[in-house]
Image (cartoon, rainbow, N blue to C red):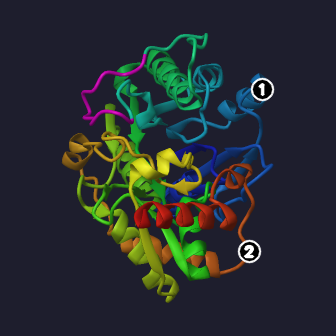
Amino acid sequence: MRLLILGGGWFLGRAVAEQALQRGHQVTAFTRGKSGHDVPGATAIRGDRANARDLADLAQRGPYDAVVDTSGMTPNLVETSASALRYQVDHYVYVSTVNVYRGWPTEPLTDESPVRRWSPSSPPGESPADQYGREKAGCEETVSRILGADRTLLLRPAVIIGPHEYVGRIPWWLRRIAEGGMVLAPGTPDWPIQPIDVRDVARFALDSAERQMAGSCNLAAPIGSATFGNLLQACQDATGVPVVLEWVPHTFLQTEGVREWTELPLWRPYPGTWRVDAARARAAGLACRPLAETVADTWEWLRSGPTLDHERAAELGITPEREAAVLAAWANHRAG
């Protein structure tokens, strides 16, 4: 298979390229070359998907049996690239997000949940997360319109983790656990979570491209397959550092103004955050490895040498001073 990856230097794009090469496919990765790095064995094409000339040159290098789009963030960019490639590609796999659902993260989701409506203007009071979901919904509409529903697969992953994670959610927890001491742990140890390994997402994307699957499906580990307690225990097992976990209720953390999702990565105390049903993908062959394996492999990657910096990595993590202050407030609250 001749495979084109739009964005093949970071995380998911990298995982797709590596696995495609292992399967014997001919891989082309189209990137700006400003971050990440090229995957050995893949043909690297430099260009900007906002530049019509760059995309025309990319299209002329076709045809391609399939494209996996891991970097389409706005409808305008997706329209430009999909239009340029529509006659040079048989099948288009667009990597979207569960943020496209109107109910995320406050409501449990299924493959049939209603999707946000795309509009070019921001509604009053729109949050960054809502904007992201609205833009990605517009991307879905755009690629489906240009390529046709029978040639398009929309993948809607929940939280993706694993080696080479540029945002750094699991890396942050691993590094924090490795420091030892008392660790601020959110909620309760039995709080269910369901992040999915990047390599499992890549495998399903490739399986889907090879079979030219169409439609849409969620990608997430099975509901109830892991807990936050499992995550932090896996971090201790991987690092070999035992810590004291101080589990602090969601409501208290909210009262203290702890920023969800960022100060304590993966902490978002809404009922739908970790209730994403991926029945359609499971029926099509999605398999998810244990969370402990993902955590251990991520730690091995972190220890293997210098990691590339990414602008989003600075978003995450509570400072030691802030963590100590919240823990002290919790101790006073319990004593009072």
| Crowd tier of the residue under label 1, counting other residues whose Cα lies within 10 Å: few below 14, some 14–19, many 20 or above | few
Q: Is residue 30 above or below residue 144?
A: below
The reply to whether the magenta stretch includes residue 114 is: yes
Most common SS among magenta residues: loop
Query: Circle 2 sits on which residue?
Result: 306
The quadrant in which residue 222 appears is bottom left
Q: Indicate the position of residue 164 as horizontal and vertical percent values.
A: 60, 64
Query: Circle 1 sits on which residue?
Result: 51
Q: Amino acid at mark 2?
A: Pro
Mark sitting on residue 8: none
Q: Residue at x 69, y 65 (%)?
A: 321
Q: Is residue 259 left or right of residue 117?
A: right
Q: Residue at x 40, y 38 (%)?
A: 155
Q: Indicate the position of residue 307 as horizontal and vertical percent values.
A: 71, 69
The quadrant in which residue 215 appears is top left
Q: Indicate the position of residue 50 as horizontal and vertical percent values.
A: 74, 26
